[in-house]
Image (cartoon, helix red, strand yellow):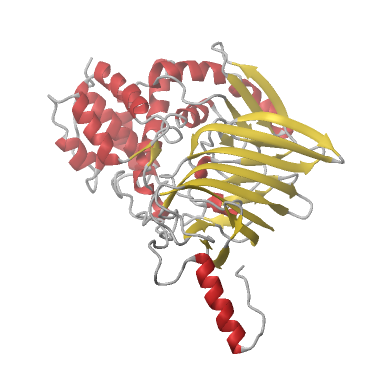
Amino acid sequence: MPRTVPLAPVALLLASALTASALTACDAGVHGTPGGSGLRDPYFAKMGNGGYDVTHYALDLAYDPDDEHLSGTATLTARARQDLTAFNLDLKGLDVERVTVDGDEARWNRAGQELTVRPHDDLDEGRTFKVAVRYSGTPETITDPDGSEEGWLPTDDGVLALGEPTGSMAWFPGNHHPSDKASYDLTITVPEGLQAVSNGELTRQRTADGRTTSTWHTAEPMASYVATLAIGDYDIRRAETPSGLPVYTAVDPAEADASREVLARIPEVMAWSEETFGPYPFSSTGAIVDRQGDAGYALETQNRPFFPGAPDTATLVHELAHQWYGDSVTPRSWRDMWLNEGFATYAEWLWDEEHGGDSAQETFDELYAHGEDVYDDLWSFPPGRPSGAAHISDSPVYQRGAMVLHRIRQTVGDAVFAGVLRGWAAAHRHGTADTGEFTAYVEQRAPDKDFDEIWDDWLYGDGKPADPGAEPGR
């Protein structure tokens, strides 16, 4: 909440205002400007903030499920992209108690989800700085435009923190847009007897005075919407893939028996995925399974996807494929969501094709002929141009997005298409990309092919495209 000025004579008020202006360099003579309060995303215009890039988040938190109280300090390391007199962070709800920039007290104010910080001194373009925000309160559950819930989701014995697309701002301040990725260190203290699971690797855990503190380290860049925190009673299992990759699973005991057989296939799915998509981009894998909370969806939380109950093999394949497409290669904006979901859906088709199920061609043909009987919105908008924020997770993004990929495969043949899958993941590993970059990449891989019909009719066209009537090249 904003700082207040006590009652005082007018002269003292004026002097105080002039002093504050000088301290924060907000007078007319400064050389910089405030950073933007949003990145003008096509569907979530206020998400993210201009003027800086975050390179690291250090979150030091404590949570007690009994009173649903979260407290802690978020320290962000960032680099100024312009001369700054002020900058914004996304934070919905919670009470801000103190803000510092490079150790100096900073002024700040709140307006909706925007926390505006005015540092003691201007920040020059290119400067690396640290902003620390101390805050506390009961985090909010956020309802998406499509009606699903995210953010901070209380369970019977703890909580789930899920972030797609805007929920991460419910539990820590940051630059909450997929275009700004960073490494993370998260330290979380909870009552003894509960586990706290996050992304990356568990580097330290200690219990004292009835409290357990766990520290998780995520070295690879991560978009905040795939950051997670799960607190509760979990059956924790550690294993390794044949290549030595750590596998860490945290499962609600009520789901342990139902989940065991599918989760035991993680090494098999990972080996197939690496063969199909290229080297795994992260330092560990696994899963979180919790039947409680309000989430009715799985999510590709980085390193270990979340499942709202025991997953089936298709869902496991889908969410692990996201580690390449979505988590490592992250959409530049929410308009590019099909680059996540189309690829992960097509991964399911490929898995079926190679494990005794329908071929991808059979799946494509059935979807083209009868898809609207299952997905009544299948042809309602093109995957490359969702019709609004409420529809970025609708079936055109998933199913028709996969159909775009299959049309590319039909056009270029299996050998070139396999190179596209692996090459795209490698070209933008740990980065961000948009649809225009993908179409250009495909055209570069097959310069002798014409993709106009695919882009015009399948990726961006309205309505049901004409029957392609072609078998995939062999």
The answer to which image quadrant residue 201 occupies is top right
As drawn, is 137 to the left or to the right of 342? right
**Count of numbered circles in the view:** 0
As drawn, is 191 to the left or to the right of 471? right
Which corner quadrant holds the C terminus?
Answer: top left
The image shows residue 111 at horizontal and vertical percentages of 52, 68
Q: Nearer the viewer, residue 276 or 312?
A: 276
The image shows residue 371 at horizontal and vertical percentages of 34, 38
Residue drawn at x 54%, y 24% is: 283
Residue drawn at x 33%, y 50% is: 386
Residue 4 position (above or below residue 328): below
Residue drawn at x 40%, y 29% is: 429
Residue drawn at x 65%, y 23% is: 260
Q: Nearer the viewer, residue 181 or 140?
A: 181
Q: Nearer the viewer, residue 330 or 255?
A: 330
Q: Is residue 111 visible?
A: no
Q: Kindly give the residue lying farthest to the top in the view shown.
A: 242
The answer to which image quadrant residue 250 occupies is top right
As drawn, is 253 to the left or to the right of 183? right
Residue 248 position (above or below residue 67): above
Q: Is residue 98 visible?
A: yes
The image shows residue 238 at horizontal and vertical percentages of 67, 21
Which corner quadrant holds the N terminus?
Answer: bottom right
Q: Nearer the viewer, residue 226 or 181?
A: 181
Residue 450 position (above or below residue 135): above
The image shows residue 195 at horizontal and vertical percentages of 74, 36
